[in-house]
Amino acid sequence: MTIYELGETEIVSQIVQRLDIEFEDCAIIDFTDTEYLVVTTDMFHRETDFPVEMSAWQIGWMCAAATISDIAAMGAHPLGMLVSMGLPDIESAFVYSMIEGMDACVHRCGTKIIGGDTDSHQELTICGTAIGRVSKDMILRRKGASAGDLVCVTGSPGMAGAGMAALRKGLTEQEIRDSVAVKKFFEPIPRIEEGIALAESGAVTSMMDNSDGLALSLYQLAEVNGCGFAIRAESLPMPPETDDGSLDLALYTGGDFELLFTVMPDRLGDAMDACELTVIGEVTRKGVFLEGDTAKEIERKGYRSLVC
Amino acid sequence: MTIYELGETEIVSQIVQRLDIEFEDCAIIDFTDTEYLVVTTDMFHRETDFPVEMSAWQIGWMCAAATISDIAAMGAHPLGMLVSMGLPDIESAFVYSMIEGMDACVHRCGTKIIGGDTDSHQELTICGTAIGRVSKDMILRRKGASAGDLVCVTGSPGMAGAGMAALRKGLTEQEIRDSVAVKKFFEPIPRIEEGIALAESGAVTSMMDNSDGLALSLYQLAEVNGCGFAIRAESLPMPPETDDGSLDLALYTGGDFELLFTVMPDRLGDAMDACELTVIGEVTRKGVFLEGDTAKEIERKGYRSLVC
């Protein structure tokens, strides 16, 4: 059977099983008595990952942001980023601008680009690698949520999806520049400070980033923890600039790079002291439901699935 | 100007300058008082990096070997490998076999695959990331060679090139299986043990891997160290299965993943206790020359250039 027939989720699940890899945002290496090293890698392609409206600088920024977001999701401090590039015969100014965007993002996250590799390739292909460190008693994993914990997010899930929807309507260049959603979509800010503060708060029981979309991320957390979720529709912070369908955007579109985490109910104050957050629901025993006037099951669909 | 007009070497040099990156086989992170972390990333594409005669298992092995070779070149202990894959719609068995080859190679090097990413892509694209650790007083860098030091290699430079030349002659499947050069080309063994032993010997002043070919690697070492090299033609271990042109293969073809290093002349015995090596020449003040009946300058050409 071909891999497209099997589907990416099945392929990844097979590989992860064969290699006995832990399903986390980053690979975790036991480095010293007190600290873990966390490492993540992400691959991007020009046509599938970057809307045509994005500038070279923004392509660089987004690659760095998406890669470093996985470091944030473990509550870790970034140590550096490496970038491999498969380059078609484009203007050198495009490549330098991309590198500048990448560099700006990693500096915003308190780290820098420390190495990489270049190669020639038909389609622009970028592979980012980020490394981080985190105290063993601070690390936040996907596993750890218990029934009764509160479900929280940073930012507005669906913001990048709202940006994408706005672009599809056909914006002028000025409208693109003025759109908050497009800006958040094109230049997401990895939640490094929030991740570290949440880790230090001691209030968080599980965490991941929502880059695959909220619904898929909830299903991933549910699977790892053997739990369910009851999400309150009216509590979801809605992305701006959307008329209707914003609930669908919040649930089923990816590319946000916000944090999705669970908090012990009696420690919510500590989590709120750590960063701005919204409580969107509660950990239950089974099923992933949206509670409004009536409860309905959230569909298991989203953006894409990553090993880490 | 486009990047193909400028050339990969110039692009890489520009990026390295702009980002103030050290020109080493790996990025080096100062992690604890006593240890460095070393990290490397390498990108590969189906058409440009893997001969059609290679099996899926061998493609996986070679990606892992090429990536981990950079860890060996620093004298470091590997801690793990991550792999990102851009996958076309191929048979799932092909992907699993590739992963098995990769896994076999990393196990051979005493480590394992700890994470990765998958994505769909027209051409099979693989990006390997390897992490290692090394004591601060052991690390071997490209910088450190002085005039008078001996130039040494592990294995036979040009072995992969000899394999490639043999394939171009059109071998039968049986001949491919029987060819030592093709085997070394398709399933190179990263010199992890040798790298660690050489680092521990205290005899080595500089080191890198020769994946870009011997000539280009010598020029890279010459540039970093502000030195020259006198290589003795008759001392070069010649690759097997080649009639004529084997000197050209030894100098100008890449893909070997052997170690190229310089040794203090009075410590050669310690280096020889560490691993099998061949002394191929001497560090001089200026110029990269081949000394035979007459001395002639080695050309600055090779396989490709990598940031790290």
Image: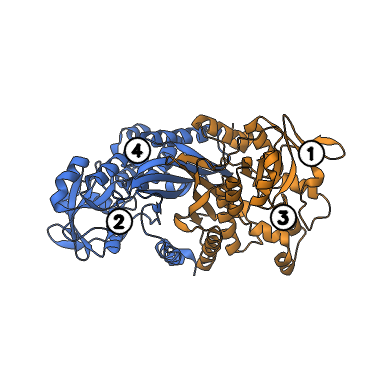
Chain colours: A orange, B blue
Between residues A263 and B97, which one lies in front from this camera angle?
Answer: A263
Please tell me how crowded label 4 is: few (under 14), some (14-19), or many (20+) other residues with Cα within 10 Å: few
Within 10 angstroms of label 2, few (less than 14), some, or many (20 or more) residues?
A: many
The chain identifier of the residue carrying mark 2 reads: B
Q: Amino acid at mark 4?
A: Leu
Question: Which mark, by number, is residue A185?
Answer: none
Query: Separation of disc 4 and disc 2 at Cα?
Result: 38 Å
Q: Is B122 drawn above or below residue B175 in the view shown?
A: below
Residue tagged 4: B171
Type of amino acid at the residue the image marks with label 2:
Arg
Chain at tag 3: A
Q: Residue at x 38, y 41 (%)?
A: B78
B100 is higher (above) or lower (below) than B145: above
User: Residue A159: percent from the left, percent from the top?
Assistant: 72, 53
Q: Which of the pair B148/A76 is nearer the observer?
A: A76
Of the two numbered discs 3 and 1 in the rendering, the one whose residue sits closer to the viewer: 1
Which chain is home to disc 1?
Answer: A
Kind of residue indicated by mark 1: Leu
Residue B218 image position (x, y, % from top left)? 27, 57
Q: CA distance from mark 4 to mark 3?
A: 52 Å
Residue highlighted by disc 3? A164
Please identify the quadrant where the N terminus of chain A is shown. Answer: top right
Residue linked to disc 1: A290
Which residue is painted at 29% across and 50% down in the image? B137
Task: Give the distance between the C-alpha atoms of the residues marked 2 and 1, in whole angstroms.
Answer: 58 Å
Q: Which residue is rendered at x = 73% and y = 29% of the image? A: A286
